[in-house]
Image (spheres, rainbow, N blue to C red):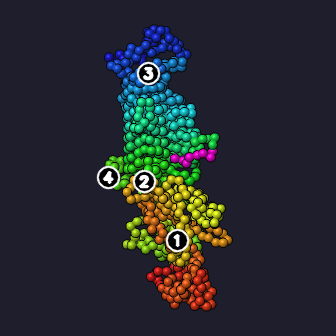
């Protein structure tokens, strides 16, 4: 019986069928219309299911559904005929009808509300096709167990979205696989669907996905855009939330400014237990979403799972693919998703293979794993202990992102080999108890805990240098000539790539202008200190106590000749994660930084003997202080008088070497 249906279905007697259609002729070849007056009359329609054995069967099925959509618009039952793929079908090589001119027979199904069973078979598309299998899968539509391959699918219209299987999905795709290549112009592009407003579960993409034009859209391995839409008759208070679950992307995904392994943009939608193992890249550092308005642009968004996030949940996902921005610049890539620093997101239980993405990934609630740890996690999530934001500062990456220059200082022989203090011709930096300072590179000093007295916080302080004059500080002083938050914000923005050091964009309220009582000079020093000071810095890590962020501080130097100058940059972070260090510990370090020459203002009651004892432990060394300052009358000091403290005294203050 099955053999008979194969023969009748694939070698249809078009003359008889044409008689049923009233002698309608169509196409360049003059073939009789192959569609029966009713789908029930077609030999492939068996027990309420249309069985597809070859390309001609598939095309007739499409014709029936498209005709029903045309004749009964809005009637989902009319386009709800179930279908079953009975063999692999190759639209490229098998005999087909001449499609040109027929009103209903097309490769794509316009609207579908039935269940299409792939039975694990492969459907191969025609090369250079314009769109995929479905234009719209309706709410009740289901497509499952199908392998779909399109050697070259290109959509170059400025609307909708395009995907291998579907342009807009309101229904459900289950256990499907896509292969080949899909490219779109001026639209969202996905390996399976262009725009997802329904459900996609346990699907795999192996196709290359490309968006190659400017505008507000992107490329995703599974979906270009995943976002809810309330249809007529549905509840606006409780909308149907799209969901992508258990899907994996292996294909290369490339966008102009926005791309993700699962979707380019995920908003009012959820993603669970998905993974990416393909290469994800965007071409440009900035996305000009309105090409005619060059001042309107978005920062590049390239992520292992989502390029950009909106209001949604993203849980238990992984990334093993490389994520990159092809154009040189300072923008960031993301291991899992960009724009996650908001309370409207839930991002938890996600992991990334160490080294696959650089940049703001450290501000996601993501754990970086080695290859061995990743394999354990994939086999059993509970076997690996996760700690979100387990990023560690990477100096080489900092040199790529920031305008760092070599330190350009020589450590004094007085402190060489001693970790508790670093003295050079420009400054003196002392460490807190239990910490040690080391020059780890020509570009940086690093202060971190050492020995038995090590702090439990794991704080690291990285001292780096940026070129002076990056910002004209004087141009931003207030009307009274004071350094204020507005000034500090402009100074911060003047350091190219500074946003890389902190999650999200920088706001004025994130800048703190602090005056710190320097322990060595006995005077006040001005610091520009930057850290997130809002609830988002806490909410982003989904941790009861942790707060994602680091603290950055620039010591400001003032002189009548030069005004304010800022060229040293101190980064405070935690080793092994990116939780904010204690602000108390930060203040303690700031107090122990001294510009050279170290100058101290005399207070009432000060004398040379007491000052010598304070700095060296031996008051009898006061003649050294007098000599450095050219004091002939060693016993006479006046309040407000400025004394220079000998550098060698700074090297041994509070030291056992007194």
Q: Is residue 53 above or below residue 331?
A: above
| Residues at circles 1 and 4 in contact by the CB criterion of under 8 Å | no
How far apart are labels 2 and 4 at the CA level? 26 Å
Q: Which mark is residue 105?
A: none
Q: Position of residue 287 (x, y in %)?
A: 57, 45
Q: N-terminal of the two: label 2 or label 1? A: 1
How far apart are labels 3 and 2 at the CA level? 49 Å
Q: N-terminal of the two: label 1 or label 4? A: 4
Q: Residue at x 43, y 56 (%)?
A: 538
Q: N-terminal of the two: label 4 or label 3? A: 3
Q: N-terminal of the two: label 2 or label 4? A: 4
Name the residue carrying label 3. Answer: 65
In the foreground, 501 or 439: 501
How far apart are labels 3 and 1 at the CA level? 76 Å
| Residues at circles 3 and 2 in contact by the CB criterion of under 8 Å | no
| Residues at circles 4 and 3 in contact by the CB criterion of under 8 Å | no
Residue 635 shows in the view: yes
Q: N-terminal of the two: label 3 or label 2? A: 3
Name the residue carrying label 4. Answer: 383
Q: Position of residue 35 (x, y in %)?
A: 45, 15
Please identify, in this view, whether the residue under mark 1 or under mark 4 is nearer the observer. 1
Name the residue carrying label 2. Answer: 539
Please identify, in this view, whether the residue under mark 3 or under mark 2 is nearer the observer. 2
Residue 180 shows in the view: no
In the foreground, 505 or 653: 505
Q: Residue at x 57, y 91 (%)?
A: 635
Give yes or no for residue 567 being in the magenta stretch.
Answer: no
How far apart are labels 4 and 3 at the CA level? 49 Å
Name the residue carrying label 1. Answer: 516
Task: Identify the magenta region.
Answer: 294-301
């Amino acid at each position: 019986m099955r053999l008979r249906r194969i023969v009748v279905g694939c070698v249809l007697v078009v003359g008889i069928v044409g008689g049923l259609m009233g002698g309608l002729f169509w196409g360049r070849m003059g073939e009789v219309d192959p569609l029966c007056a009713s789908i029930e009359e077609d030999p492939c329609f068996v027990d309420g299911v249309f069985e597809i054995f070859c390309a001609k069967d598939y095309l007739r099925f499409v014709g029936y559904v498209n005709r029903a959509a045309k004749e009964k618009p809005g009637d989902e039952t009319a386009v709800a005929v179930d279908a079953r793929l009975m063999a692999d079908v190759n639209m490229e090589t098998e005999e087909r009808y001449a499609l040109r001119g027929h009103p209903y027979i097309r490769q794509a199904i316009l609207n579908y509300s039935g269940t299409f069973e792939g039975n694990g078979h492969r459907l191969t598309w025609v090369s250079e096709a314009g769109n995929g299998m479905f234009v719209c899968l309706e709410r009740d539509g289901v497509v499952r167990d199908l392998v779909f391959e399109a050697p070259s699918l290109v959509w170059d219209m400025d609307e909708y979205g395009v995907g291998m299987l579907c342009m807009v999905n309101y229904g459900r795709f289950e256990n499907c696989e896509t292969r080949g290549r899909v490219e779109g112009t001026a639209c969202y592009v996905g390996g399976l669907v262009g725009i997802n407003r329904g459900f996609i579960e346990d699907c795999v993409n192996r196709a290359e996905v490309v968006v190659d034009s400017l505008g507000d859209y992107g490329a995703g391995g599974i979906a270009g855009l995943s976002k809810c839409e309330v249809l007529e008759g549905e509840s606006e208070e409780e909308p149907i939330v799209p969901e992508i679950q258990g899907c994996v992307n292996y294909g290369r995904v490339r966008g102009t400014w926005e791309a993700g392994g699962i979707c380019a943009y995920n908003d009012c939608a959820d993603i669970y237990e998905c993974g990416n193992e393909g290469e994800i890249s965007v071409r440009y550092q900035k996305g000009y979403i309105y090409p005619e308005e060059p001042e309107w642009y978005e920062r590049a968004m390239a992520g292992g799972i989502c390029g950009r996030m909106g209001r949604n949940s993203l849980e238990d996902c992984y990334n093993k693919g490389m994520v990159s921005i092809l154009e040189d610049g300072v923008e960031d890539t993301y291991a899992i998703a960009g724009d996650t620093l908001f309370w409207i997101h839930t991002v938890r239980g996600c992991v990334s293979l160490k080294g696959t993405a650089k940049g703001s990934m450290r501000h996601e609630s993501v754990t970086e794993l080695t290859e061995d740890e990743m394999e354990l996690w994939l086999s059993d999530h509970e076997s690996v202990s996760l700690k979100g934001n387990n990023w560690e500062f990477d100096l080489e990456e900092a040199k790529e992102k920031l305008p760092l220059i070599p330190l350009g200082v020589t450590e004094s022989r007085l402190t060489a080999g001693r970790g508790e203090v670093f003295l050079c011709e420009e400054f003196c930096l002392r460490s807190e108890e239990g910490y040690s300072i080391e020059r780890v590179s020509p570009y940086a000093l690093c202060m971190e805990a050492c020995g038995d007295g090590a702090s439990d916080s794991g704080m690291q302080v990285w001292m780096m240098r940026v070129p002076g004059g990056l910002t004209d500080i004087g141009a931003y002083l207030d009307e009274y000539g004071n350094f204020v938050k507005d000034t500090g914000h402009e100074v911060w923005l003047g350091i190219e790539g500074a946003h890389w050091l902190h999650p999200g964009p920088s706001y004025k309220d994130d800048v703190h202008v602090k005056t710190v009582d320097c322990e060595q000079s006995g005077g006040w020093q001005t610091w520009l200190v930057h850290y997130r000071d809002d609830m988002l810095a806490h909410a982003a890590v989904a941790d009861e106590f942790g707060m994602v962020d680091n603290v950055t501080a620039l010591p400001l130097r003032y002189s009548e000749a030069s005004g304010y100058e800022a060229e040293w940059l101190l980064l405070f972070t935690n080793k092994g994660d990116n939780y904010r260090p204690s602000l108390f510990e930060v203040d303690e370090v700031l107090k122990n930084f001294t510009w050279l020459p170290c100058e101290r203002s005399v207070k009432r009651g000060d004398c040379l003997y007491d000052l010598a004892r304070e700095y060296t432990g031996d008051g009898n060394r006061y003649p050294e202080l007098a000599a450095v300052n050219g004091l002939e009358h060693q016993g006479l000091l006046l309040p407000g008088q400025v004394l220079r403290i000998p550098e060698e005294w700074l090297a041994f203050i509070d030291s056992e070497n007194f």
